Image (tube, rainbow, N blue to C red):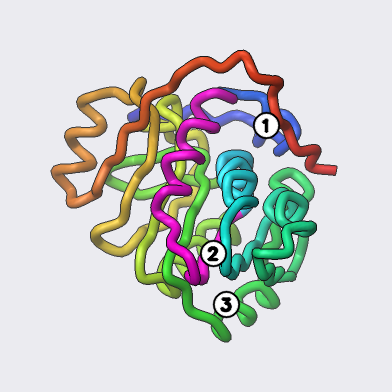
Amino acid sequence: MALTAHPEASLRQRTGEAFEEKRAIARRAALEVRTGETVLLDAGSTVGALAHELRSAKELTVATTGLTALQELSDVETVHVECLGGTLRPLSQGFVGPLTEAALERMTFDRVFLGTDGVSPEHGICEADLRQTRLKELMARRADHVYVLAHAAKLGRRPFHAWAKLPAGWTLVTDDGADPSVVAELRGRGVEVVLTEVVASHEPEHRTSPS
């Protein structure tokens, strides 16, 4: 895969991209969450869409590094929310840095859901900032089950040079537009790939403002 460098898009810009795909992925990912679990949510628009799906959850504890998830769940009485603070990255609307990492050391999780800018069968998942990739690796180590949420256009994509290596047996949740050759290579490397069907909806779009 050739590296295609470009400026990092803001969360506001990315929220409207592949909207139906992200919503389908979020709905499928929400099915993995069980009552009474403690889950960790990354920053990002697709994981933010998952937070929206979890608004109807019961007896759930959610820890997050993302402002979008905080906004989605802040008024839900049946979900206990923990914010992993730190240094805020304005572009991603997520917390990073030593304070975030120190908070992670105090908790473990049943499941973690990560976002990404690119997925490579060889390298793992890609971000613009090494602080982000280090944090994602730490998040993955603290959870029993690791999920990456990424729509099909991100598979085989290398927009930046910072990578996170994930533990064996992680799960990619993507949409049915995924390149079969990339899916096959991921599965060949031990990644579980869940393909979800994208059905266009005529419902009003739900978009959480990152501001």
| The image quarter in which residue 104 lies | bottom right
Tell me the element at label 1.
helix
Residue at 61%, 51% (x, y): give it.
Answer: 56
Contact check, label 2 and label 3, Cβ < 8 Å? no
First in sequence, mark 2 or 3: give its number. 2
Question: Residue 101 location, x and y as percent?
Answer: 60, 75
Picture disc at residue 40:
2
Kind of residue at disc 1: Thr
Residue at the outermost bottom position? 106
Question: Residue 198 location, x and y as percent?
Answer: 43, 22
Instruction: Give the mark toward the camera: 2 or 3.
Output: 2
In magenta stretch: residue 39: yes
The residue pinned by badge 1 equals 15
Tell me the element at label 2.
strand
Question: Residue 160 location, x and y as percent?
Answer: 51, 40
Segment tinted magenta in the rendering: 19-42
Kind of residue at disc 3: Leu
Left/right placement of residue 108 relative to residue 47 reads left
Left/right placement of residue 72 relative to residue 57 reads right
Q: Compare residues 194 and 133 and report the one nearer the observer.
A: 194
What is the CA distance from the residue labelled 2 to the residue labelled 3? 10 Å
Picture layout, residue 152 above or below residue 210:
above
In magenta stretch: residue 80: no
Left/right placement of residue 50 relative to residue 198 reads right
Tell me the element at label 3.
helix
First in sequence, mark 2 or 1: give its number. 1
Picture disc at residue 104:
3
Kind of residue at disc 2: Leu
Residue at 36%, 58% (x, y): give it.
Answer: 165
